[in-house]
Amino acid sequence: MAKVILSISGMSCSACSNSLEKYLNKQKGIKNATVNLVLAQALIEYDESLTITDLNKFVEEAGFKSLGIYNEKKETKKENNKQILIIFTLLVILVLYISMAHMARLPEIPFLSMKHHPINYTISLLVLTVPFLIYGFDIFKSGYKNLLHKSPNMDTLVSIGVLASFIYSLVGTFLVLFKSTSYMETIYYESVVTVIYFIKLGRYIDRKSKEKTKEALQELVTITPSFALLKIGNKEKEVTIDEVKKGDILICKPGMKIAVDGTITKGKSHFDESFITGESASLKKGPSQKVIAGSLNIDGTVEYKAEKIGKDTTISEIVRLVVEATNTKAPLAKIADKVSGVFVPVIIALAVLTFIIHLVLRDPLSSSLIYFVTVLVVACPCALGLATPVAIVISEGLAAKNGILIKSSEILENAHKVTTIIFDKTGTLTYGKLQVNKIYNYSSYSEKSLLELVASIENKSSHPIAKAFKEINSSLEVTNFKDISGYGVKATINDKDYYLGNGKLLEKLSIDNNHKEKEKSLQESGNSIIYCLENNKIIALIGLKDTPRDNAKRIIKELKYQNKRVLMLTGDNEITASVIAKDLGIDEVYASLLPQEKTAKIKDLITSGEKVLMVGDGINDAPSLKTATIGVSLSSGTDIANNSADVILMNNNLVSIINLLNISKKAVINIKENLFWAFFYNICMIPVAAGLLSKYITMNPMLASIAMTLSSLTVMLNALRLNRIKIRKN
């Protein structure tokens, strides 16, 4: 299966996005398609027997236009045609003045007086209306095409209403020309003009607001520089990012940004990676250390080897993940989509019924038509369709900007519902920066030689414990390296077989352990244990000590205050785990667990009705992260796409758990508020538009178009409040 994000043109409301989504999902070869109205994108999973050309064709068959594969670098702010809007603002004021000056007792334009020059009056309004019909041609085109595809949308409603008013007014104009001035009161060109104008104004504001919702994504996209300094011999050459190739040596001077992901080959400097971690503290890096595209070089000149370029860079991967996440559907959005799917046909039926009832009640044809048009215009599904996606886009963009990558909208909606939070120990609750604390050497090797041997083997491992030996010389040649999940590792050096692992490794290999007292002593002082075996004989016992993260204790206390059940699941021994847990205030500890035992425990909790959030390092905890209701991984920012977690904390800061729960809670509240106002608006406006409350209040198409614009604006402004969520740094 392949996956692609297409940019879509021509969607104006939720009915549009729903009809396109339904059409795509019906096509053979498409496994799943979701359409995002706010981002104007379609995320499509499809069989590789299809091509992008086929997908573009499907989009066009549905009545829309595909702009091709989404490219974050080419995503720019759309032209809002401000000048054109200003011109039509002046025209609409002129139309309203000509048609309503006498009602407001304002001075009339003498030769356009309705009373004294009826023909001039009607012809002038007709002439001024024609530019608006041209201005709104895209509305009519969209409405017609969607009706043709049996998926009527907001444009369909507006088109029917506007054209009905125009044709009726046109007939009235011909009658006036033939001296039937009694038909002057049945000319509604101002309704045609104002409806088109306010819809265009609404879309202008809507585009502005949508750009605002995508600010966090746009900031991520523009983080990486457009140029890089390429080293050629002893010279420097400025090249574009597209010219950089893997293996090139690039130069980064103070004040410049790293152009692509790579490894430092020469020099040292401090780097600001706050764009990806959300933390302001700079990191000191030197030779052999990784640098990420977009990092700001603060105080030193470095040379680095280009390793990941273009779409392979960490920041591109992050943008892709966030965009994919915002294109997924949250449960609340699916409910709104179902309602929107039947909304337009129901409104058309209600408008026709309103028209017929008013004729039956012997209302004038002109009045019945006004009720018909007003119902069509006022019942806008836009607010309903925008209620969820705008909140999702803002929330996930805000989270990404602060180092929290959420892989799907469903996770964002459900995060605040978790009842149990499980932490791994090493590298999660602790820094994972173990240091050799104590060595019991039973071999003929010197301590230095022993550590070199262990470091050479651990250098092949990705386990957090291996980091304890990173600074130790590891020049020995290692062959036949094998990871024994949950127990340790095996390797060969100089034709001798070595095992490094925990106490369970000895049981697995059926080796007697005569060092349990030493092991217990190390454990009681908070050490993690490594047994070193040479040809199945214990040659050393090494104690490694780790320290809890600075804010871990405070975060756990706060989670408990929020009535979250907090557990620790670790493969480390029970004594060491208990020492750390007691220090941090965790009451429930399950130690000496194999990966499958961690997974089984999580399954038991879920079966008992708990909603489990698991926090781990994303490597050894992959099965547990996948099993949990929500898996949260602490990550260094590499191999993001291969991570098993639903959420990735780029800053390795546990306060992000609190931020995640807070963003989730605020986003869901915001979505519910938006849905409430969208439904409330339609419940209130449709009866008024239909004339059911005409004794108390009346509405015409002009007021209906204003109300429709305000409904969408209300939802957008409410969603933008999410940008004010307070993000904690510690």
Image (cartoon, grey):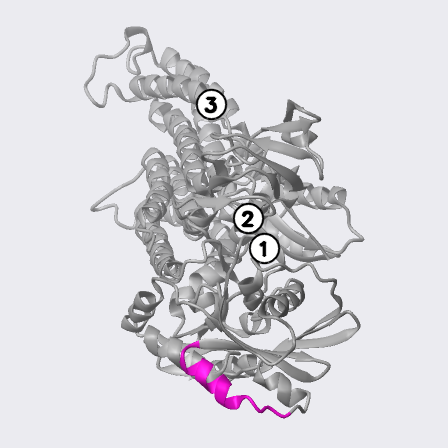
Prevailing secondary structure class for the magenta stretch in the rendered image: helix
Marks 1 and 2, how far apart at CA: 8 Å
**Could you say which disc has been placed on residue 67 in the image?**
none
**Could you say which disc has been placed on residue 318 in the image?**
2
Front residue (pair 421, 715): 421
Answer yes or no: do the residues labelled 1 and 2 have beta carbons within 8 Å?
A: yes
Mark 1: secondary structure: helix
Front residue (pair 258, 695): 258
What range of the chain is rendered magenta?
512-526
User: Is 218 included in the stretch rendered in magenta?
Assistant: no
- Give the foreground label among 1 and 3: 1
Q: Earlier in the sequence, mark 1 or mark 3?
A: 3
- Give the foreground label among 2 and 3: 2
Say if 349 sits above or below 491 in the image.
Answer: above
Q: As shown in the figure, which amino acid type bears the numbered disc 2?
A: Ile
Q: As shown in the figure, which amino acid type bears the numbered disc 3?
A: Asn
Answer yes or no: do the residues labelled 2 and 3 have beta carbons within 8 Å?
A: no
Mark 1 closeness class: few <14, some 14–19, many ≥20 residues within 10 Å: some
- List the residue tagged with mark 1: 640
Mark 3 closeness class: few <14, some 14–19, many ≥20 residues within 10 Å: few
- Residue drawn at (38%, 79%), measured in percent from left and top? 579
Marks 1 and 3, how far apart at CA: 40 Å
